[in-house]
Image (cartoon, grey):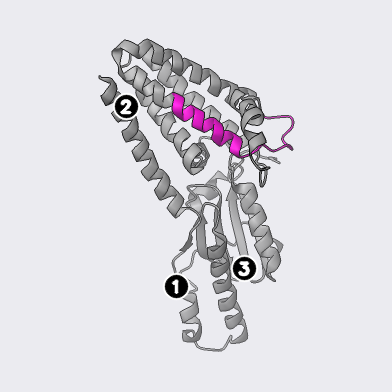
């Protein structure tokens, strides 16, 4: 192989790696709706901690590993967000201790953060450190819908549907 | 897994990325050298040097890596203090992954497997490049996938 071809191979590998890097960076930390628009169709996560570990209004579940570089910073972010909102708590799970949960919740990277509503149903998931604006928006959506349900518990489901569908 | 005695002291997160940038250049040179028959031996020697460097970082810990010392002496004085420190375990694990990949490539190359050296170096190059340029830790993703696959047994009592 000539020098030119060999350098071309390296340049090709670096172009491929750049594409992978751009895609990963674009996707990381974005809010993804967990699907399920009705109360019964949502995947629940109500056995991850004792009842006192969950927030009355919402819970942030962080999946971590010992080799996760971003997990400590994500822990601080979630603690700060939880501290700013009444009834919001954070649960952290070390996947090295509970590998079965990685399969059950389809965790492909750490940190992965699940946002649970008051029913402990998964509403939003973040792969990678959550982007603060998207985390705040997702949490506000859950808290707003939750308070609407609480104050209008006898109202028709349609009144809260527009807020929940986000 | 490696255990370090002074886990309470974090490292500057820019230090492993600085090291990954040097590793990227060395691995790129390894690929070029091992693809050209006339310089194959030089490429294998360079790959062996990279294996030794990964071994230092992966076995002795990232804090004892020569690139870390270089970073502290040459680069860090020119930068602002880090916004926050990171745990040394993740980059140390990344070094172990790099050690595994490059050591297997070196061994296969010495056993006469064609293109083992450039292919192994290419795998490590992608990981080092993503770490240096995009701050993406492929080793950290790999660890999660290994946990999912049940390769690691559950660890109890981890601090």
Same subunit: marks 2 and 1: yes
Q: CA distance from mark 3 to mark 1?
A: 17 Å
Q: x%, y% of residue B120? A: 39, 25
The residue that mark 2 highlights is A7
Q: x%, y% of residue B110? A: 39, 11
**Which is more foreground, mark 3 or mark 2?**
2
As rendered, which of B26 and B114 lies closer to the eye? Answer: B26
Q: What label sits on residue A58 in the rendered view?
A: 3
Q: x%, y% of residue B101? A: 45, 26
In which quadrant will I find the C terminus of chain B?
A: top right
Q: Circle 3 marks a residue in which chain?
A: A
Determine the image quadrant of residue B88: top right
The disc, 3 or 1, on the residue closer to the chain's N-terminal end is 1
Q: Is residue A90 visible?
A: yes
Query: Start and end of the magenta stretch?
Result: B1-26
The disc, 3 or 2, on the residue closer to the chain's N-terminal end is 2
- Mark 2 and mark 1 residues within 8 Å of each other at the beta carbon: no
As rendered, which of A59 and B46 lies closer to the eye? Answer: B46
The residue that mark 1 highlights is A37
């Amino acid at each position: 192989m000539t020098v030119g071809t060999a350098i071309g191979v390296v340049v090709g590998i670096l172009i491929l790696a750049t594409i992978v890097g751009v895609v990963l960076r674009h996707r990381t930390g974005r809010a993804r709706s967990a699907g399920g628009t009705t109360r019964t169709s949502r995947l629940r996560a109500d056995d991850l901690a004792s009842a006192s570990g969950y927030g009355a209004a919402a819970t942030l579940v962080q999946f971590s590993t010992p080799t996760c570089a971003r997990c400590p910073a994500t822990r601080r972010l979630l603690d700060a967000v939880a501290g700013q909102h009444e009834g919001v708590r954070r649960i952290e799970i070390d996947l090295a201790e509970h590998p079965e949960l990685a399969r059950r919740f389809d965790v492909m990277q750490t940190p992965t953060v699940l946002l649970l509503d008051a029913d402990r149903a998964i509403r939003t998931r973040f792969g990678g450190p959550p982007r603060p604006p998207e985390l705040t928006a997702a949490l506000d959506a859950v808290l707003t819908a939750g308070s609407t349900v609480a104050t209008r518990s006898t109202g028709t489901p349609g009144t809260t549907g527009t807020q929940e569908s986000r | 897994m490696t255990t370090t005695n002074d886990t309470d002291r974090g490292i500057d997160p820019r230090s492993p990325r600085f090291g990954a940038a040097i590793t990227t250049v060395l691995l790129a040179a390894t690929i070029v050298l091992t693809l050209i028959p006339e310089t194959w031996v030089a490429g294998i020697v360079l790959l062996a040097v990279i294996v030794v460097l990964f071994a230092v970082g992966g076995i002795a810990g990232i804090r004892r890596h020569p690139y870390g010392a270089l970073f502290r002496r040459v680069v860090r004085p020119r930068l602002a203090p880090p916004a926050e420190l990171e745990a040394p375990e993740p980059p140390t694990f990344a070094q172990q992954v790099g050690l595994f990949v490059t050591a297997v490539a070196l061994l296969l190359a010495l056993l006469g497997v064609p293109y083992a050296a450039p292919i192994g170096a290419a795998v490590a190059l992608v990981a080092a490049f993503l770490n240096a340029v995009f701050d993406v830790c492929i080793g950290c993703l790999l660890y999660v996938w290994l946990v999912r696959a049940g390769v690691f047994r559950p660890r109890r009592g981890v601090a």
